[in-house]
Structures are given as structure tokens and as C-alpha cells.
Amino acid sequence: MTTATMNGVDRYIEAARAATAKRAELRARVRKLRFDTIAVHGMYGLEEAFAGGQGGIVEPIFPSTSQAYRDSDEMEAALSYRIPTWCYSRIHNPTVFYLEETLALLESYGCAADATGLCTSSGMSAIKQAIEPLVARRGNEPINFISTAQVYGGTFQLFNLRMAERGAEVRWVTEPWKIEAWEPLIDEHTRFLYAEMPSNPQQACTDLEAAAELAHSHGLPLIVDATVATPALMRPLAHGADIVVHSLSKTAGAGGNAIAGGIVARHGLTARHLDDDQRADYALWLKLWPFRDSGPCMTPISAHYLLNEMRTLRLKMAQMSQNTMVVARYLADHPKIERVDYLGLEHHPLHELASRYMKVVDDETPAYGHLMSFIIRGSAADARVFFDGLQRTFRATDLGRIKSVATIPAISTHQQQGEEGRRLAGIPPTMVRLCVGAEHPADTIDDLDQALAQI
Ligand SMILES: *Cc1c(COP(=O)(O)O)cnc(C)c1O
């Protein structure tokens, strides 16, 4: 078709094709850069800054709910998804898109397959969006999925209650680090395998490569919640996982300014219950259809905060991992502590498995993140005396902060799942979860020390 014979809609499609090709070329170039460079710049380069950002060195915040079109032809081309468009901010937003690209590029760093990112309003909505199409009902057949028993409290409720309400049964793997524990739970009605690694708060680990292989041998996807590790320490896609979900409210957003989530899905994932077009680019398909129809979008302000967090992700994760190691060694030697669970300690039964997967990116030093838990020697009341005695460490149901935060999981994050659920997940009332921040570790130790002296 020559330009003269094109109608208006086609002309917009033609123009968009050139712009899309240029963007793909830029993305291919960015994908070849090192982790820190991608984290700092993402897809917002000089050209982008001068084209739409008025020269600003930081991605602009676009609060606009929608995009105006030049004429009816452009509107028709855009709303039939035949040209890239911002159309309406529940679906697409330029600021959120910069974050989605950065997240996808970091999470697929070192992975042969490319991936697409989708940002969501929270970590829970990311998990829900990622799994919903996989448990879609066809007729009356039973549906199940397999998950590590050690999951975040909200995930436990989503899997145990909300998924049961729609007829999808969760089957828990209590010892997910043993790959042979997964296989007997899989049958012809299984839709996906799900692993939280390391889990919050128990730090359970899964052999990701073995789990991906097992999932794929049954035509199923492996989904990994890598919230605690972040792509600075672990990138499950490179180990064969199909989908990574994140609570960006936590470690990735260490400053603590936004509730947010993200999904990164590899292109061409394994999932025999999905159609070809769903598998080809699952995160994009989610964005254009089910996500659009449910509406758990991220605000551009949150994306702005998180883009800034991403730039220093590796630095923070390396430093906080180091600090946590110092604090963990101090606690391990303390007479009032019964047990310290930190993957970085050699005595931790999963230390070796974690060491295979958790390393500072581009540097390869083993690093185990800043989540740890410990058990107070004594009663539940003793644990509360210690907890109430903390003077700088914040008591908060929170995780992954640049500031040290502590919680008692049995009375907070894991309260609602009840005694039985907590027993299954290995959470006694004397357990304290501590996320060591970026303060000098000697000061963090001083605070813990004076609080322990109060028991
Ligand atoms: C907090 C958390 C979630 C849920 O994220 P929100 O952003 O709070 O919705 C999911 N997974 C893990 C591991 C978490 O710590």
C-alpha cells in the first residue's frame, strides 16, 4: 500500500511501526548494559529526555488519566491496540511504563529469554493477577496448584481461602527444599507450581532449577515470589522460572514510600493451560485484558518513588546483607537467643542451597539479604518484653526497609492464619522477625542488646 492509498488509520499504524522499531532497537541496546547501568537509567536516555521530558534527567511523572488523540483515525488505531498508546492510565501510563521496563530488564538480566513487566497496585494484586488466568475454569474439572507452605501471610490467605472459594485447591509443600516433595502432589489437574524464595519470614528455599525442570516436564509454569531477594541478589528467570512476582512495597522499595507490586513473565513461557497468544507474552496479555478489566493499577507517583529506589538497588542489597550478617553473628552468640535463622549463617540447613542462588549481581559474592528471624529463649511474654524494649528499631509489620524494622509474626503478619497454619509454617510465638537496615550495624546491635537485657 502506498501512502497515497492508505486510509487515516493505516497511516497512524505505519508511523507507529517506525517508532516501535526504534524503541525495540534501543531496548536491545539497553539489555546489553550491566545491571547497575540499567538500574540507574532504564529506558529513559538522553533522547527520551529531550523528546518528551523537557531535558529533565529524571523520568517525568505523568499524572494525566488519559491521552488525547489528534483525530478519530488515531483514536481508532489506538483503542484497537494497533499502535502503542497511553489511552487511559488504568491500562498504560508513561511513568509506570518506565518502571515496568526497568523491572523487566533487571529481572531478566543474564537470562537468554526476554521478559515483560507489569506493575500493579500491590504485591497481593501482582500475585492474584499472575495466577488468576491459570486457574480459569473449563467445565467442571477440579483444579489445584502447588505452593511452598512457607509463604507471606497474605499469600497464604489468598491461596487457602480466596482460591478455594473459586474451586482451586492449594496443595502445600512443607519441605520445598526437597525436590522429591513436590512431584507426588502434581496430577493432571495441577495448573502451576509456586515458590516464595526466600520466604517471609522463615527463609525457606527451593531448588529453583530443579523445580522449573519438574514444572516444565508436566507442561506447567513455575512462579516465584522473589520479593525478599530482589533482582540484585537473585533472578529466578535465569534459572528457568516462568513468572516472577514482587511486592515492590518491600525490599525493592526500601525507602517505604509506596504500596506496589510487579509481575515479570518470560516470553514464551510453559503453561499448557494457556493459549499460544497468552504464552507468547503473558505479562503484556495480562495488561491488555484481565488486568485492564480488574483495574489494580499502580499510580505514577508510586512508579516515580520506585524508579528512584531501583537506581541504588544493588548497593543497598549488598550493604544491608553485610550488616545483617554482622547482627546475625552477634545474636547467634547471645545466651538469651535460642536460635537464629539467617541463610547467611553456615549452620542454617539451607545455607548451601541459598548460596547457589543468592549472590550480589555482577560481583558473585554470596549475599543473603536482610531478612532474618530469631527465637527468644523463654515465653511469648518474654518475646514481647524484648520487642517492647527496642528503642531505635521500629516495631512495624513491615519488611525490607532501609531502617531496621522488627515484628512478632504470630501476633501480626501471621495472626489470621491461626495456630494450625502457624504450626504448619513453623512460626512459634517467640519468633521475632528482624529486617536489618542500613544503619551502622554496631548501633543496631546496641539497640538489640539493651532490649535483650530487659528480659
Ligand atoms: C508483603 C509481601 C507480599 C504482599 O505485598 P503487598 O505489597 O503488601 O501487597 C507478597 N509477598 C511477600 C514475600 C511479601 O513480603
Image (spheres, rainbow, N blue to C red):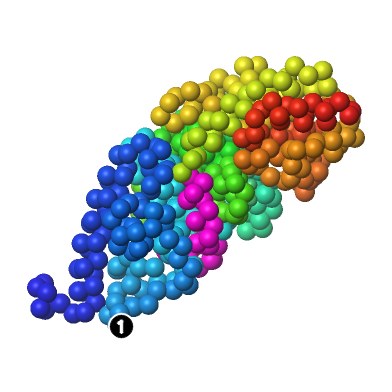
- Foreground: 33 or 183? 33
Work out whether residue 203 can be spotted.
no
Q: Is residue 380 above or below residue 350?
A: below
Residue 298 belongs to the span the image colors magenta: yes
Q: Secondary structure at mark 1?
A: helix
Q: Quadrant of residue 407?
A: top right
Q: Quadrant of residue 49?
A: bottom left
Residue 17 position within the rendered picture, expressed as x and y whole percent measured from the top left: 22, 63
Residue 71 position within the rendered picture, expressed as x and y whole percent measured from the top left: 29, 82
404 to the left or right of 88 = right
Magenta segment boundaries in residue numbering: 288-310
Q: Residue at x 40, y 29 (%)?
A: 362
> What quarter of the picture does the N terminus occupy?
bottom left
Residue 114 position within the rendered picture, expressed as x and y whole percent measured from the top left: 34, 44
Near mark 1 (Cα within 10 A), the count class, few <14, some 14-19 or many ≥20, is few
227 to the left or right of 6 = right
Residue 41 belongs to the span the image colors magenta: no
Work out whether residue 251 can be spotted.
yes
Q: Residue at x 35, y 47 (%)?
A: 268
User: Circle 1 sits on which residue?
Assistant: 72
70 to the left or right of 430 = left
- Foreground: 381 or 165? 381
Q: Quadrant of residue 213?
A: top left
Residue 159 position within the rendered picture, expressed as x and y whole percent measured from the top left: 64, 49
> What quarter of the picture does the C terminus occupy?
top right
Ligand 1: does it lie within 8 Å of the C-beta at label 1? no
Q: Amino acid at mark 1?
A: Ser
- Foreground: 353 or 192? 353
